[in-house]
Image (tube, coloured by chain):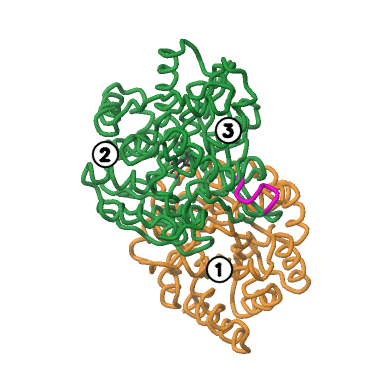
Chain colours: A green, B orange
Amino acid sequence: MSYQYPDERGHFGEYGGRYVAETLMPALLELEEAYNEIRNDPSFKEEFHYYLKNYVGRPSPLYFARRLTEELGGAKIYLKREDLNHTGAHKVNNTVGQILLARRMGKQKVIAETGAGQHGVATATVAALFGMECEIFMGKEDIRRQALNVFRMKLLGAKVHECTSGTATLKDAMNDALRHWVTHVRDTFYVIGTVAGPHPYPQLVRDFQSVIGEEAKQQLQETEGRLPDVAIACIGGGSNAMGTFYPFIKDKSVRLIGVEAAGLGVDTDKHAASITAGAPGVLHGNKTYLLQNEDGQINHAHSISAGLDYPGVGPEHAHLKDIGRAEYASITDTEALAAFQKLTRIEGIIPALESAHAIAEVMKLAPTLPKEQILLVCLSGRGDKDIHTVADAMGVEF
Amino acid sequence: MSRIDKTFADLRRKQETALIPFLTAGDPDLATTSKLIRTLAENGADLIELGVPFSDPMADGPTIQAASERALRAGTTVRKVLQLVAEVRSDCQIPLVLMGYYNPVFRYGAEQFAKDAAAAGVDGLLLVDLPPEEVGEISAIMKAAKIALITLLAPTTPSERMSKLAAAAEGYLYYVSMTGVTGTQKVSPADIKAAVENLQSMTEVPVGVGFGITTPEDAKAVGEFADGVVVGSALVKIIAENAGSDELLPRVGKFIAELKQGLLA
Ligand SMILES: Cc1ncc(COP(=O)(O)O)c(C=O)c1O
């Protein structure tokens, strides 16, 4: 199977591209050139892996979830433990990569958008590590939901901008980050947190996150001597999923399943399932599946998990969906909460609500598969940041 | 000759600079926009950029963001904006350029949009987030419908790229006077003069300058060298402040007349 995406214009089939204002175009071309230079530069790879190993704590373990497997009574479940990374999620793999790239490009300031705050924290962390100025854009609604992460970012020395326009969530934070970038494009590097945005971001974020799938592949080879039958990951913009899937794309026997947030249900207007229930369109610099109305206005997304609460999805997922290489399922708030509690009780692992969506899909799928099959799940983050949300949902007051 | 080309040719003969106001269609409602367009035309506007509202206006500052939100809340859609243009054309022939973001056009279907927009009497289209790298997907369609695709250039655009874009330009070129979003900083005419003149030396197509032009003095200063000046946020602000009042049309008319005076002075 040949799979060579994106093409030289940054397209994944119909999707991707660079739909941005002219002011940003030269910066994207500069970024593309810089990225193409370092991609195959052994000294960059070495530096990247030095920080992944010594700072992030990689490789992350591949853990056989024995009790969950027994309880579900089907396929063997392996959890790729991105929750054990420094800062508690997969997001830091990407921010380490991008900050090293920013340094090589001579940029002194970084900005980022954030939803759950995990990408904001991961960006503020690496900015502190390298002594760079950092500004984070976050929706007012998310600032309320993720107060702990906001304080964390401030402790790390970042300035947090509250975004009040539109729906005051991740999509609007990204609008404001793009507006800030337009204004400060000459000295500022924009650290995008997922496999979305204009080319080359979907490509470079995927490449940095691919360490997830590469490690898992090798770890499974060591313990099981073979490939997984299924790889599952949750989808906000789709970076932990692309990182998990990409190293398996040419291994046709491996089913790839992305799990979107169904919120209150995909047949309601309160969900974030862009691939399942959206239509192609253009937002934030790329063409992809979007939640939108008949007039091309972007709809509000909803998920109990702030990190999945986005009305779009990375363009490579849109392409994988269209060519049939990956499947996309969706999980409701209620199902995610049940999975959150199940994994906590049965394995002693408190997952992020985002990751709980992947676990919930596993709980549906594993029992239907034979015991000798192997299910690889990306446990993208830990749930400490979500304790308040979960307590709220359970009606517990502190 | 298209309405846009004819307008600039006439102005060039008279050695005048085009006054190009921008307003958001449907802010505060489409009936008012219809009256505003005529008020602009009667008071000296040479071409109008009519904003098609979008839920996520990434290149706009707070003033035009708020206008878009008001327009969408008032029920404005692409279809209704085209109906507005058709209605205006019954008695008003000022060149009209629709300005906005790509998604509403993409969703409408570029082919259908081109057909309906041309039938309504739209002269040009300026999509902020459809740069030369991507415009290929609609350029042949718009050309066939005789809708000019207006190209944006920015202070960050390198000279080589500028000459390439200038060579392919139609209608007019829109030079963004600053690195930033709309309506947040003031233009500095002295800083952009050389860039605009350099651009003019590359092409016969007229060069309009926009972003940060808010007063007759700004218009006059930029008009010394530019072929057109675009006034957006300042006008949108006046519309917002006077929406629903009898003062709206007189105030807008006066503002436009003063800008025109500045350009003629
Ligand atoms: C733990 C965790 N998982 C998943 C996501 C979703 O992002 P992506 O789809 O890019 O992996 C987030 C986003 O904040 C997150 O914090």
Q: Residue at x 59, y 37 (%)?
A: A15
Region of the chain picked out in magenta, as a range? A262-268
C-alpha span from label 3 to label 2: 43 Å
Q: Secondary structure at mark 2?
A: helix
Q: Which residue is mark 2?
A: A103
| Amino acid type of the residue that numbered disc 1 sits on in the rendered structure | Ile
Q: From what the image shows, is residue A261 above or below residue A13? A: below
Pair 1/3: label in front: 3
Distance from disc 1 to disc 3, alpha carbons, whole Å, reads: 60 Å
Q: Residue A248: x and y, percent?
A: 51, 21
Residue lying at the far bottom in this picture: please name it: B246
For ligand 1, tell me if the residue under mark 2 lies within 8 Å.
no
Q: Quadrant of residue A37?
A: top left
Residue identifier under label 1:
B20
* Chain of residue at mark 1: B
Residue B97, quarter of the rendered image: bottom right
Residue A155 coordinates in the image, percent (x, y): 25, 54
Please tell me which residue is depicted at 37% across the width and 32% down the height of the picture.
A35
Judged by depth in the image, the label closer to the viewer, 3 or 2, is 3
In-image side of A302 versus A307 (left or right)? right
Q: Is residue A144 visible?
A: yes
Sequence-wise, which precedes: disc 3 or disc 2? 2
- Foreground: B100 or B168? B100
Question: In the image shown, does A95 or B89 lie closer to the viewer?
Answer: A95
Query: Mark 3 highlights which residue?
Result: A363
User: Which quadrant would the N terminus of chain B be assigned to in this image?
Assistant: bottom right
In the image, residue A320 above or below residue B265: above
Report the predominant secondary structure element of the magenta stretch: loop
Q: Which residue: 49% across, 31% down?
A: A242
